[in-house]
Amino acid sequence: MADFSLAVTDAGLSMITDTAFGGTIIFTGILLGSGSTSESAQSMSSLVKVEVSLPISSCTKNGSTVVLKAVLQPDDVTETFTWREVGIMAKSSFDETEILYAYGNAGNMGDTIPGPESGTLDERILEFSIIVGNTASVTAVLDSKIYATLEDLAKINDVIPLTHTVDSGIHIFTGLTREGLVPIQFAATADYTAGQTITIDSVRYTVALSSGDTPNGIVWKAGTKQLGLCDSTNQTLIIIQSPDNVPAHNVDPESHPDIRALLSNHEGRITRLENILLSDITGNPFLITFENLDGLVVTGTWNQAQARMEF
């Protein structure tokens, strides 16, 4: 792999100064490029030629430096290129303008990144260490997909049980004893609907799904056991969809409306076929369903989603 020595740009140094006594540096992405330049890294404001833009998968602050990780996958590369440039993008809590925070160029020592025509690119985990000085706060816009390191997987059996309660509509968790990316479990005492407020040990968190999908509707139900990852660095509770939720979801009359409507329609058709083949009908039979109620007088509740009457 090419050896990149990243230097903080002039714009990055200005951001460090602006946030030294308050505010947050927010890392937003990592760029890979193929360009060559004779300019110093500090003076760069953009890459010469961007080839790939990667989301950040993890951000860890250690003293005056930050370690950022990203994952390069075959689908990220559209054609073969020589990887010479790296750019770290960031913005501050004072200014939403995204700037090139750090830059590195490997020159003639770049790597060849194969495109889809060769089919030889393996997934690569990229890691970059960057100076942030004494900035009070550092965070990152993370990829929606969750990646675990070997160290994370080695700790997977060291699951921390959290206590879950609800007070005034706020989901309250207590009992987190480690920082970082920590495997957790809890017994849900109430339903959680996407968008509701949660706190862990009095710190506000957001909820994400390990699948990368956006939480929608009821994420977990009361009485179910939940597994997840607690990311204390980015104040995110990542829920691993529990098998306990499946039976409760399947029997919920509001779930799978398309499948229920299709099943109801098929049941009606099967009944009519049985009547035609097995019943001794001597009159003039006719077929009608409740899909169109024009001209019909019925008693009951019309379930439009499932095209049936309920009594």
Image (cartoon, rainbow, N blue to C red):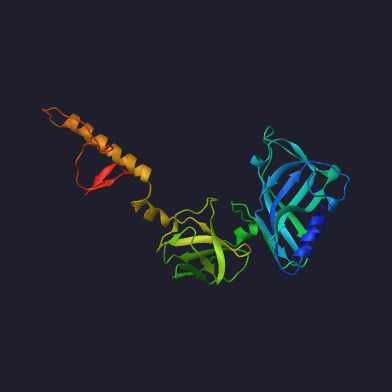
Who is closer to the viewer here, 28 or 2? Answer: 28
Who is closer to the viewer here, 135 or 96? Answer: 96
Determine whether, in the image, residue 277 is placed left or right of residue 216. left
Which residue is at the far left?
282
Q: Which residue is drawn at 76% across and 37% down?
A: 81
Q: In which quarter of the image is residue 187?
A: bottom left
Who is closer to the viewer here, 185 or 293? Answer: 293
Would you say residue 238 is visible in this rendering?
yes
Which residue is at the far front?
295
Would you say residue 131 is visible in this rendering?
no
How many numbered circles does the render carry?
0
Q: Where is residue 68 in the image (x, y as percent from the top left)?
A: 71, 56
Up/down of 147 relative to 265, above or below: below
Who is closer to the viewer here, 249 or 39? Answer: 39
Q: Quadrant of residue 140?
A: bottom right
Q: Which residue is drawn at 84% across and 44% down?
A: 109
Q: Where is residue 234 in the image (x, y as percent from the top left)?
A: 62, 62
Q: Which residue is drawn at 32% across and 41% down?
A: 263
Q: Where is residue 159 in the image (x, y as percent from the top left)?
A: 54, 65
Determine whether, in the image, residue 304 is placed left or right of residue 223. left
Determine whether, in the image, residue 243 is placed left or right of residue 6. left
Up/down of 290 relative to 242, above or below: above
Up/down of 13 relative to 273, above or below: below
Q: Position of residue 151 (x, y in %)?
A: 64, 60
Which residue is at the far right?
38
